[in-house]
Image (cartoon, grey):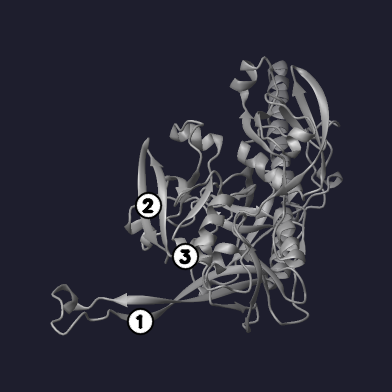
Amino acid sequence: MELQIKNTLLKMKSNIKNILGVATAILVLLGLNAATNFSTLNLPFLDTEIRPAEEKKLISLKDFNDAIVDIAEKTNPAVVTVNTEKTQEVQLMNPFSFFGDPRGQIEPETQERTQKGLGSGVIVSEDGLIITNNHVIAGADKIKIRLYNGDEIEAELIGADPQTDIAVLKIDAKNLPAVTLGNSDEAKVGSFVLAIGSPLSETLAHTVSFGIVSARGRSLNSLTTYGDYIQTDAAINPGNSGGALIDMDGKLIGINSAIASRSGGNDGIGFAIPINLAKRIMDDLIDDGEVSRGYLGIYPSEVDQVMAKALGLNDVRGILVVEVEKDTPAEKYGLKDKDIIVSINGKKLGDTSSESFRTKIAAFKPGDTLLLGVIRDEKEMEISIVLGTLPNINKVIKDTPSKSLDEELGFSVTELTNNIRRQMDLGNDIQGILVKNVRQSSKAYERGLRNGDVITAVGRTNVGNTEEFYEVIQKNLDSNRKAILLTVERQNFKLFIAFELN
């Protein structure tokens, strides 16, 4: 009987020890020592291997909450609301025009309408420099900034870069609450972030939402030519574009730009332009009035697991050089077809898409020297390359023009990458550019141009890239020719589409 009682007591001691051990762990994780008001935890039956709670430095949930509040209070005043106005002439329908007019043709009436837009921006200098998205201010005749204190100031457009969707504004003000720029390269997946902006309407300005960095290195080719987006689940909605993505040091690490959504609202998938890229673009626009990009001169393709096995390489990740273009830095400094680029300046590429690789190269300046880690014939080597200059594809928007080239065309274009070729089952013999973002109100759409069409020629001039396309369009504008003839490939059929510029 005495032995049975002793065994029962030992069993109870073990169970209590386990329960209290779990309870202690929960208290430690949740930081509830402040709430329980205990300075020590006297836990019976615990052996000496478990340290008492008083020896552990605990942080309460309230401390964490106070830190978030402090960051929001310090950074929110640096976020502004961007209001835009664009005046358009609208042709009014004349009910008698269907039947004609016995006294002659009645001229259609026109009426001016003002289209208003809403976005966000971030003050990055005390003297009034503001970063926002190009799509927030594109084509605007007037840009007004509303500050945190409610003041409204008209803004000047310093410049914009449609290829990265970055624009820089300037307002005439001093001693503004500027945010500190962080290092977006250090933003790890899982890191806490705040998104600040003006979602949906001006009445919701300076909305703060909380989330994490969900992913890095996302490409959005349907929106921008270059992008290395930070993905976040912090709530982002229409109107947040151009707003701030803030890290837990209270520093700006991204410019909120886009969402992926089936509903048109927040589905927990938002994208921000890394501040390192945005700052690079901003500095170019301020210093030179245009953006210069590094140029390597290869056709890249992603080396995934299957391709690595096919090449006889087990765990290699990087970029396969499909083709080296002639008279380019890549050819000059010795890159060859079938080389595999595995690192840039000692930093491994890992799982990198060809679009992400192009963005990484374009983020460097012409004249920068890169040390590329390369595998050639299963042997590792390093090649030093001085980058050339990538010609501007879109002219930088400056001095608030009433319309950009894309506005006049009613659509935009992007390069025909190898990935797009594979998706569309296009052969290498078809050289051209891909049509995207065709506005349904445009004359190009009325005449039959659609997203996904491949433009191979403008008039009698073949176009193999976006630079050539815009050059030909600009020549038409310079010679006052408004009618444009496009040669288009669509699902292995050749079409001719003629339209007048808007």
Asked which secondary structure carries label 2, the reply is: loop
Looking at the picture, how far across and down is residue 468, in whole percent? Answer: 56, 50
Identify the residue shown where x is 36% and y is 52%.
497
Give the amino acid type for the residue marked by disc 3 in the picture. Answer: Glu
Sequence order check, earlier mark of 2 and 3: 3
x 59%, y 63%: residue: 134
Q: Which residue is mark 2?
A: 449
Q: Quadrant of the C terminus?
A: bottom left
Residue 438 lies, with reference to residue 294, above or below; the image says below
Whether residue 463 is visible: yes
Q: Amino acid at mark 1?
A: Gln
**Residue 232 versus residue 483 in the image, above or below:** above
Give x and y (percent) for residue 69.
Answer: 69, 65
Mark 1 or mark 3: which comes first in sequence?
1
Say which of marks 1 and 3 sits in front: 3
- For residue 111, the mark is 1
> Which residue position holds label 3?
408
Q: Amino acid at mark 2?
A: Leu
Q: Neighbour class for label 1 at 10 Å: few (<14), some, many (≥20)? A: few
Q: CA distance from mark 2 to mark 3?
A: 14 Å
Residue displayed at 50% across by 50% down: 260
Give neighbour class at mark 3: few <14, some 14-19, many 20+ (Cα, 10 Å). some
Residue 151 in the image: state x and y as whole percent.
63, 84
- Pick whichever, 153 or 5, lies toward us: 153
| Circle 1 or circle 2, nearest the eye | 2
**Quadrant showing the N terminus:** top right
Q: Which residue sits at x=40%, y=54%?
A: 485
For the residues labelled 1 and 3, the Cα–Cα distance comes to 19 Å
Helix, strand, or loop for circle 1? Answer: strand
| Image quadrant in which you'd find residue 197 | bottom right
